[in-house]
Image (spheres, rainbow, N blue to C red):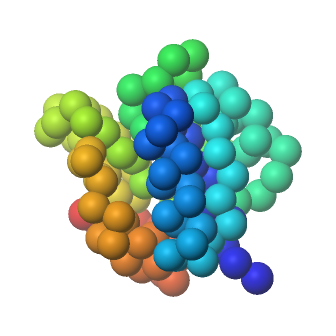
Amino acid sequence: MPRKILLIEDDDNLRSQLAEYLSLKGGFQVEEAEDGLKGLEKLKKEPFDLVITDITMPYISGIGIITVLKRENPDIPVVAITGYGAEVESLAQEKEADAVLPKPIETEKMIKLLEELLSKGGKDGS
């Protein structure tokens, strides 16, 4: 059974490209949400093995997602993605994101990271 990932990203093109890549190349089952609010709704309805969230989004930011998820489901690994640099990255790490990846995303590196996080179940330290 493929691992189930929730991808929360407000950029429609990036979200669909990443979802397709993760599904085809990584073998993951990917559910998509276009903003933090819809992401939280999906998290309440069904279980996920890992969450990937953009940091800067409408309604609820990725930082908000990380905070709620780590409080309610601390064992689910969370990968934050951002195009906004070191200050935002450090905030995501402070809120206990398991990893932070800069945009543009190196997809092969991302798949390797996801596999590592899923195999050990969390906190990567990178």
Relative to 29, say whether 101 is above or below.
above
Q: Residue at x 52, y 76 (%)?
A: 26
Q: Position of residue 112 (x, y in %)?
A: 37, 77
Rendered-image quadrant of the C terminus: bottom left
Residue visible at 31% across and 39% down in the picture:
82
Q: Residue at x 60, y 44 (%)?
A: 69
Query: Could one spot residue 36 in this view of the protein?
Result: no
Could you say which is closer to the camera, residue 38 or residue 87? 38
Point out residue 107 in the picture as x, y percentages from the top left corner.
35, 64
- 103 relative position to 15: left or right: left
Q: Position of residue 78 (x, y in %)?
A: 49, 54
Image quadrant holding the N terminus, namely bottom right
Whether residue 28 can be seen here? yes
Q: How many marks?
A: 0
Is residue 24 left or right of 96 when viewed as pictured? right
Placement of 95 over or under 61, stated as above or below: below
Q: Is residue 115 above or below residue 38?
A: below
Rendered location of residue 15, percent (x, y): 51, 44
Relative horizontal placement of residue 72, taking residue 81 as reference (left or right) = right
**Residue located farthest toward the left when viewing the structure as drawn:** 86
Q: Is residue 106 above or below residue 121?
A: above
